[in-house]
Image: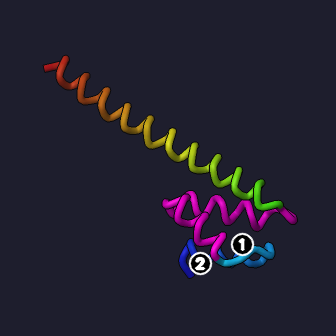
């Protein structure tokens, strides 16, 4: 079973339509983010859809900050290489 399928199953188990899970998986994009969201859903009790969406946005924000930090580190290493020539 793919991480997307697990997320969709977790959403359906919470009583929401499959399409909600598909939207979440599409927004989360990365396998790690999808697994984090699935773990959150499985470890929690009943949740309103707004809280699920808020958690999805928090995971996306954290993922985007990580990607931005890695890009910045890469650019800084290139600048350092240039200066050290």
Q: Residue at x 57, y 44 (%)?
A: 61
Instruction: Measuring from the top left, give residue 7's x and y in whole percent.
Output: 64, 71
Q: Is residue 32 left or right of residue 8?
A: left
Q: Which mark's residue is nearer the viewer, 1 or 2?
A: 1
Majority secondary structure of magenta residues? helix
What is the number of callouts on the image?
A: 2
Assign a secondary structure to mark 1: helix
Q: Is residue 80 left or right of residue 40?
A: left
> As displayed, is residue 76 above or below residue 83?
below
Instruction: Measuring from the top left, give residue 10's x and y in whole percent.
Output: 71, 73
Q: Residue at x 51, y 63 (%)?
A: 31
Circle 2 residues within 10 Å: few <14, some 14–19, many ≥20 = some
Q: Is residue 54 left or right of residue 83?
A: right
> As displayed, is residue 15 above or below residue 24?
below
Write down the region rendered in magenta.
19-47
What residue is pinned by disc 1? 11
Instruction: Measuring from the top left, give residue 15's x and y in whole percent.
Output: 80, 76
What residue is pinned by disc 2? 5
Front residue (pair 56, 33): 56
Instruction: Measuring from the top left, give residue 9's x and y in whole percent.
Output: 68, 78
Q: Residue at x 57, y 43 (%)?
A: 62
């Amino acid at each position: 079973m793919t991480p997307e399928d697990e997320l969709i199953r977790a959403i359906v188990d919470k009583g929401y339509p499959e399409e909600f899970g598909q939207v979440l998986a599409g927004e989360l994009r990365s396998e790690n983010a999808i697994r984090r969201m699935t773990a959150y859903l499985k470890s929690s009790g009943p949740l309103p859809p707004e809280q699920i969406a808020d958690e999805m946005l928090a995971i996306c924000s954290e993922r985007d900050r990580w990607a931005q930090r890695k890009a910045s580190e890469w650019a800084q290493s290139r600048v350092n290489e240039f200066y050290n020539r």
